[in-house]
Image: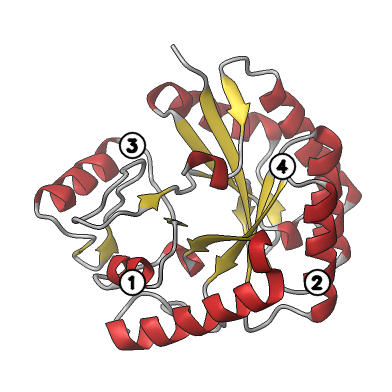
Amino acid sequence: MGKKTIFFRNDDVYKLTDELAAVTKLFLNKRIPICHGVIPAKVTPETVSWLREMKKKNPGLIEIDQHGFKHRRRYEFGGSRSYQQQLKDAKHGREMMVRYFGKDFSEIFTLPWQSGNKDNIRVLVNLGYKAFSGNYSIGFYPKVFYALGRLLRKNNLFGYRVSYQGYEEILGYKIKEISVSIDLVRDYQKKKIKRKNEFIEEFNRIKKSENVLGIMVHHYVFNTDSKIEDLGSILEFLKGQPEFLFKRMEDLI
């Protein structure tokens, strides 16, 4: 049997903060790749320069993705927003990412709030994205829901996104979904992260059924030294899992 894969996705990157620098430094010190989701309309010149420098020094450990456009509304790329509305925003954001990052831009789109609607796939394919990332729930009922949606050839059913995790082709379009299944944050409002034992229990429960496990970070929640230490302890635990390799989403295309 071949090795399984773990990747880390860190969204909401736009301002160069102590938290962003600390989380990135930790991953680099552990030699574990991290995929940074940049908000094009909000990212600062300082952050662009810093990310490009980090990428230059650590090309195999840093990935720069597009995280929506403005990320101001929950359903920026979901809800009732039309194909043309999404196309306009995604195109503008993509142009900004190319202008800011050039070849350092992965051409991978990460969905804000993991949302989506029936027009997502067509928008992303028509703009030439290589892959996209949302949320992939693991469990009996989500898998039944996904199977029903795929059977009906839908990417949105009853108002919820249908995942095509791992598929090389979706509804006749050549694009790959590489989504996250585990979130390291337990409570975003209170900025609480999961305890190590809590994370390990969740990881052990789902690792046998999946060949690719995406883990969500969100750097701004890791705002104390103790949280960074806890994250480091989790990373060390994962490094001790012999059946897994660490990769970027780019490596999975």
Can the viewer see residue 71?
Answer: no
Q: Is residue 160 at least partly visible in the picture?
A: yes
Query: In this rendering, which labeled residue sits more in front, label 3 or label 4?
Result: 4
Q: Residues within 10 Å of mark 4 (few under 14, many from 20)?
A: some
**Mark closer to the chain start, 1 or 2:** 2
Q: How far, Cα to Cα, is label 1 from label 4?
A: 28 Å
Residue at 44% x, 63% y is 129
Circle 3: residue type = Gly
Horizontal and vertical percent position of residue 62: 72, 50
Q: Which residue is mark 4?
A: 60
Q: N-terminal of the two: label 1 or label 3?
A: 1
Give the Cα separation between the discs numbered 3 and 2. 38 Å
Q: Which residue is mark 2?
A: 47
Of callouts 3 and 2, which one flags the residue occurring earlier in the amino acid sequence? 2
Where in the figure is residue 172, as x and y percent of width and height?
19, 55
Q: Residues within 10 Å of mark 3 (few under 14, many from 20)?
A: few
Kindly identify which residue carries mark 1.
Answer: 126
Mark 1 element type: helix
Q: Can you tell which of label 2 and label 4 is closer to the viewer?
A: 4
Task: Please tell me whether residue 205 is drawn above or below residue 87 in the rendered image.
Answer: above
Type of amino acid at the residue the image marks with label 2: Thr
Q: Amino acid at mark 4?
A: Gly
Nearer-N-terminus badge (2/4): 2
Measuring from the top left, give residue 119's x and y in whole percent: 27, 73
